[in-house]
Image (cartoon, grey):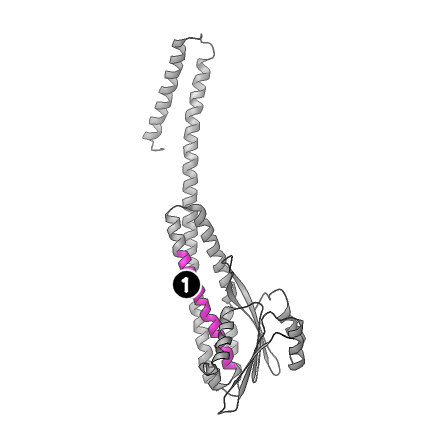
Amino acid sequence: MPKIQKISIANPRSGNTVDWLNINSPGKAEIEFLRKNYNFKLPQLHASSAKANSQRTIIARENDYVFLILHFPAVGADSGKITAAEIEFFIGHGFLVTLPSQAIEPLNDLFRLCKKDKSSLLSAELTSSAVLLYEILNKLLEYSYVQLDQNSLAISQAEKIILSEDQKKAAGLVLNLRHNLINMRKIVQNHKNIIKQLMAMPSSLIPADQLKKYYGRLIEQTKNIWETLENQREMVEVLYDSQESLANYKLSSIMKTLTIFYVIFSSLSLIAAIFSMNLAVGTANFWLTIGAMAAAGLIMFLVFKIKKWL
């Protein structure tokens, strides 16, 4: 049996109904069900069941529906890294089909809320698939703020660790932050353009001005998310440069110390070799050699100290 979750959102006053079908990780049975019951194009259905995510967002207007592919950030439970979760949408008069490539927390939360209390949704009052799509996208974009807050906390933690000079831990945190920010930017960069195209989507139930107002809020959200990502990217780049500078300074200090030790001890070895060449063995020669080595070492130490190389 196909693993299809379905909710019918009905308005008794208007008599209108919107069916929401949510299919997590669709397989052959689910695709066959959609093929038999809806007039969706096969290439789009196959894209929904593909194991690999699409590399770009897609919006395609067909005769009686609109097909969308959008990506949203998802955090790995173990790795803590942000990856792209793909959702395919089929939207038409009286229906909306969502096909996430993996379980997406905010989408599942909204579906459970809709199942438990349909009256809490705006789409229950307006019974429009366009409004239901707006509510889903709004929920998914709001979840991005949770991930942005986690980025901010990680940035603060990385800053403290860098100042404490724990270079190894700081490098790992900064690299993970850069990876997450790059992925989030790639994921959300096309949302604004897709939503602008959705604003022009005609609806037989909702006036164009009202629909434009709802989707205009989504565009504002995408702008805010992008601006926050830009600010976080700049902060992480500063942290990365600081961490690199501290690491280079620490490395240069180690190399300087090693060089000084090398110069001192190689000089002492040279003196010992000179005095051992044609000198008779005896207590006086031994102490003379030791004294010369100590004097040479002390002189070089004082020179390094005066030059502020130590």
Tell me where residue 136 appears, x and y as whole percent. 50, 75
Q: Is residue 107 left or right of residue 52?
A: left
Q: How many marks?
A: 1
Q: Looking at the image, which is closer to me, 271 or 92?
A: 92
Give the residue drawn at x 37%, y 25%: 300
Q: Is residue 227 left or right of residue 128?
A: left
Residue 19 image offset from top left, x and y in percent: 56, 82
Q: Main secondary structure of the magenta part?
A: helix
- List x then y, in percent, for residue 149: 41, 63
Q: Is residue 118 above or below residue 261?
A: below
- The N terminus appears in which quarter of the rendering? bottom right
Residue of label 1 = 149
Q: Residue pushed farthest left? A: 306
Residue located at (41% from left, 12% from top): 286
Q: Secondary structure at mark 1?
A: helix
One can see residue 192 in this view = no
- Up the image or down, 295 lies above or below 53; here it is above
Is residue 132 inside the magenta stretch?
Answer: yes
Q: Residue at x 65, y 78 (%)?
A: 33
Q: Which residues, given as a range, are shown in magenta?
A: 130-155
Q: Can residue 109 be seen in this snapshot?
A: yes
Q: Position of residue 209 (x, y in %)?
A: 46, 84
| Nearest the eye: 300 or 112 | 112
Q: Classify 309 as above or below 38.
A: above
Where's the C terminus, which quadrant?
top left
What's the amino acid at mark 1? Asp
Residue 149 in the image: above or below residue 256: below
- Asked where in the image residue 146 lies, by quadrant, the reply is bottom left
Look at the image and say whether residue 256 sits in the magenta stretch.
no
Circle 1 crowding by C-alpha within 10 Å: few under 14, some 14–19, many from 20? few
